[in-house]
Image (tube, rainbow, N blue to C red):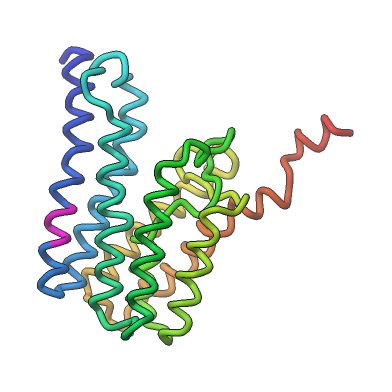
Amino acid sequence: MTARLKALFVHFLTATGAVFAMLAMLAAVDEKWGLMFVWLVVAFAVDGIDGPLARRYDVKANAPQYDGVLMDLIIDYMTYVFIPAYALFKSGLLPGWTGWIAIILITFASVIYFADTRMKTKDNSFSGFPGCWNMVVIVLFALAPNFWAILFIVVVLAVAMFLPLRFIHPVRTDRWRVLSLPMALAWTFFAGWAAWVDFDPASWAHWGLIVTSVYLVFAGILQQLVPERKARNRAA
């Protein structure tokens, strides 16, 4: 297989995310939340795979007629933001005006963040919460906390999108990647299982979701607070 064909297949793999987004949306319209999240987890897995493949097969050089970054952003907005926001609104987890506040904050703040050219840091982490509302909402569905707690989490994370806080990219952030990548894979497994059993409150996957989510949210901030040893040595 030629380098051009390999690069094209990577683009086609990325494009399947739009199909999974549509399947998730159809499930959401029917309020089949477990099935909706199964499709979103599949899209999340594809999103984790296509980036390394795109760099490996140099899609910018071998298939430049398609903009993989733009394709990825379009799909990410659907699967990371739009569909999870809809689910949060229609599920009843946020009743009345609280649901309206949530979907307005999530969709408005996220589209601004996705267009921000400063969203990536030098170490390939994200500057500010990276709009991974799919990950947030699936945990909220699993744990079903009080609606005030949900609204508080949504507001805090929406504000955090524009604060100088660092959030790791499990694949591209080198520091702690030996731990971050397995944590991200474990999160994907726990999320998929929780959705598959339709968020059964007795499911052990919920504990796995809590542990892995706490790590993925706070690892980058902890890295900011604890500078690398090499950097400290140079400073000395």
Q: Give the farthest residue toward the right.
A: 236
Number of marks in picture: 0
Instruction: Give the residue displayed 16% in from the left and 42% down from the top.
Output: 16
Is 136 left or right of 167, judged from the image as shown? left
Residue 23 on the magenta segment: yes
Above-or-below relation of 38 to 59: below
Image spot of residue 44 (x, y percent): 30, 51
Magenta range: 21-25
- Viewed as shown, does residue 54 lie left or right of 160? left
The quarter holding residue 97 reads bottom left
Who is closer to the viewer here, 164 or 8?
164
Q: Residue 215: x, y in percent?
A: 54, 60
- Give the vertical position of 204 relative to 69 (above or below): below
Residue 14 among those drawn in magenta:
no
Residue 40: image quadrant is bottom left
- Identify the residue at image location x=83%, y=33%: 233
Query: Residue 151 location, x and y as percent?
Result: 44, 77
Q: Nearer the viewer, residue 138 or 52?
A: 138
- Residue at 12% over, 69% down: 29
Q: From what the image shows, is residue 78 above or below residue 9?
A: below
> Magenta region, mostly helix, strand or loop?
helix
Looking at the image, residue 150 lies above or below residue 157: below
Locate the N terminus and report the quarter of the image it occupies.
top left
* Position of the C terminus by quadrant: top right
Name the side, left or right, on which 223 lies relative to 23.
right
Q: Picture coordinates of residue 210 (x, y %)?
A: 46, 70
Q: Residue at x 17, y 46 (%)?
A: 18
